[in-house]
Each structure stands twice: as C-alpha cells, then as structure tokens.
C-alpha cells in the first residue's frame, strides 16, 4: 500500500515524522510531500498565485504514480484543499482520501468558500 501524506498550513512534510516510520515499519510505502513554499521547497509564498501553484508538488507526485497503482491520500488542515484538487485530477489513482481535521471542499462552492465564511464572521 502506498500512502501519500499532505501537511497542513504552516507545516511541511516534516510534520509526519512520527507517523511515516510507523507506517513504513508496518510494510507501507510512504511519501510525505512538501507543498510549494513549505518545508524544504525553495519557493516563496509571493511566487504562488493559485491553489494549483501551491499544490504543484503533490500533483507531480500523483502524475508519477503508475497507472495500475492506487494510493491512500491523507491530508491535514489546509491540506484538505490540496487533496480536493488532486482527487479532481487523479481520481483513477486514489484508493481512498482521508481528511484529518482538514478542509473538505465541496462540488458546489468555490475552493475559498469556507475561508470566505470565516472572514464574514470576523
């Protein structure tokens, strides 16, 4: 089983440092992704113009997965938005998506809907 871990806001792949070795010890293949301008990714936030830009490292991982392989995609916090985009583009390569205390985009509203609702409350 191949598991792809996606961090949340203000984190990087490093945040999975406890879970990744446990999954690997259980025999799973694990990829922890640094999203754009996060972790060891050298880009700055000012360079990113869209959710797709921010998600690009995850999309590259998904594109590299062989057609016969399906992954377990796990996202935390803001990483749920990245999962939504990857699910849209690579649904044939995903066995299941797990949203861990994460944003869960829907099919009706724009991706910023939840954040827009929070802004209205503040």
Image: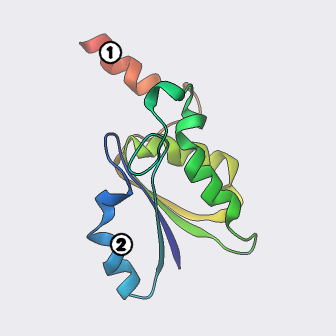
Residue occupied by mark 1: 119
Task: Tell me the SS state at disc 2.
Answer: helix
Task: Tell me the SS state at disc 1.
Answer: helix
In percent of width and height, residue 36 lies at 49, 42
Query: As displayed, is residue 113 above or below residue 57?
Result: above
Query: Residue at the spot x=34%, y=40% of the render?
Result: 9
Graded by Cα atoms within 10 Å as few (under 14), some (14 to 19) or many (20 or more), the crowding at tag 1 reads few
Query: As displayed, is residue 97 above or below residue 77?
Result: below
Query: Residue at the spot x=36%, y=19% of the render?
Result: 117
Q: Are the two marked residues, 2 and 1, in contact with CB atoms closer than 8 angstroms?
A: no
In this rendering, the label closer to the viewer, 2 or 1: 2
Task: Name the residue nearer the viewer: 95 or 50.
Answer: 50
Left or right: residue 69 versus residue 71 is right
Graded by Cα atoms within 10 Å as few (under 14), some (14 to 19) or many (20 or more), the crowding at tag 2 reads many
First-in-chain label (2 vs 1): 2
Query: As displayed, is residue 19 above or below residue 54?
Result: below
Task: Find residue 79 and report its image quarter.
Answer: top left
Query: As displayed, is residue 17 above or below residue 90?
Result: below
In percent of width and height, residue 12 lies at 36, 51
- Residue 55 is marked as none
Left or right: residue 21 versus residue 85 is left
In percent of width and height, residue 7 lies at 38, 51
Q: Quadrant of the C terminus?
A: top left
Query: Residue at the spot x=32%, y=47% of the render?
Result: 11
Tell how many labels: 2
Query: Residue at the spot x=38%, y=50% of the render?
Result: 39
- Residue 20 is marked as 2
User: Separation of disc 2 and disc 1 at Cα?
Assistant: 34 Å
In percent of width and height, residue 60 lies at 64, 54
């Amino acid at each position: 089983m191949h598991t792809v871990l996606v961090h949340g806001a203000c984190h990087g792949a490093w945040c999975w440092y406890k879970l990744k070795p446990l999954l690997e010890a259980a025999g799973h293949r694990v990829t922890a992704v640094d999203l754009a301008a996060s972790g060891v990714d050298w880009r700055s936030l000012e360079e990113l113009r869209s959710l797709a830009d921010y998600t690009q490292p995850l999309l590259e991982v998904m594109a590299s997965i062989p057609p016969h392989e399906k992954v377990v995609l796990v996202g935390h916090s803001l990483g749920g938005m990245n999962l939504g985009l990857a699910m849209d583009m690579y649904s044939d390569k995903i066995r299941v998506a797990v949203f861990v205390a994460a944003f869960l985009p829907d099919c009706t509203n724009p991706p910023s809907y939840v954040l827009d609702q929070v802004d209205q409350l503040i």
